[in-house]
Amino acid sequence: MSSEAVAGDPFPAAEKSPKRRWGLVLVGATGGAVLVLYAATAPFVAPALRRICLPFVPATPAQVESVLQLLSGRRGALVDIGSGDGRIVIAAAKQGFRAVGYELNPWLVWFSRYRAWQQGVHHYTRFYISDFWKVNFSEFSNVVVFGVPQMMVSLEKKLQNELKENASIVACRFPFPSWIALQESGKGIDAAWLYNAKSFKMTAKEKKS
Ligand SMILES: C[S@@+](CC[C@H](N)C(=O)[O-])C[C@H]1O[C@@H](n2cnc3c(N)ncnc32)[C@H](O)[C@@H]1O
């Protein structure tokens, strides 16, 4: 076949060659793969690039156990601040809590919803794609957080302003800097601390008067 341009044909012959077509397919496929890879990984990298770096590190089974033990006997609404793959919310729902998770990463939220459905607790759980700094936690009487030391001062202030006196708070791995824990469970990376809003609300009132 001639490679000469045919009069009236808007596309030069070179553009129709199989080599060029394969080149285009390869460029398209590579671009598509890069986009898919970006969409899959960006939500995991993004939390680490924020002012306070809080990456996805799932709680260990011993940590989950500590949280449940510290909250045993309590009921009502529970929130996990930065709920990751939903393991704490799901475990809490199995213990009878109405449990909610706020999480930035949409993949983790979709996975959490799937796991809750798979484990038969989807009616008792809710997962939201949200920045927890923009959520008001006043409706929750049980709060769980597995954070990082850099965020605990700000979170302490936020919770102090928002929570009611009947709220209990559990911090995993890193304690709150000024509140005094009522109870501690687990050791090392599995450690968790229980706080009572009544005690820190009273201390705040005493400081004011
Ligand atoms: C240390 S992991 C804890 C996950 C889960 N709570 C657990 O114990 O298995 C912290 C989670 O917080 C999420 N995160 C970080 N910044 C956030 C923000 N501003 N709002 C909501 N979630 C956030 C991360 O994506 C990550 O999944």
Image (cartoon, helix red, strand yellow):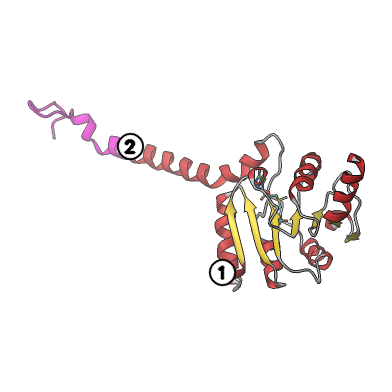
* Residue farthest left in this picture: 7
Q: Nearer the viewer, residue 85 or 141?
A: 141
The residue lying at 70 percent from left, 56 percent from top is: 80
Q: Residues within 10 Å of mark 2 (few under 14, many from 20)?
A: few
Q: Nearer the viewer, residue 187 or 1?
A: 187
Mark 2 or mark 1: which comes first in sequence?
2
> Which SS class for mark 1?
helix
Q: Does the magenta portion include 168?
A: no
Marks 2 and 1, how far apart at CA: 42 Å
Task: State left or right for residue 128 relative to residue 55.
Answer: left
Task: State left or right for residue 130 relative to residue 147.
Answer: left
Q: Residue 24 shows which numbered tag?
A: 2
Q: Nearer the viewer, residue 195 or 91?
A: 195
Q: Magenta stretch: give its range.
A: 1-24
**Residue 166 in the image: x percent, y percent?**
80, 60
Q: Point out the frontmost of discs 2 and 1.
A: 1
Q: Is 69 above or below relative to 144?
A: below
**Residue 192 in the image: x percent, y percent?**
84, 57
Amino acid carrying mark 1 in the image: Trp
> Which SS class for mark 2?
helix
Amino acid carrying mark 2 in the image: Leu
**Residue 16 in the image: x percent, y percent?**
21, 35
Residue matched to label 1: 117
The residue lying at 64 percent from left, 43 percent from top is: 134
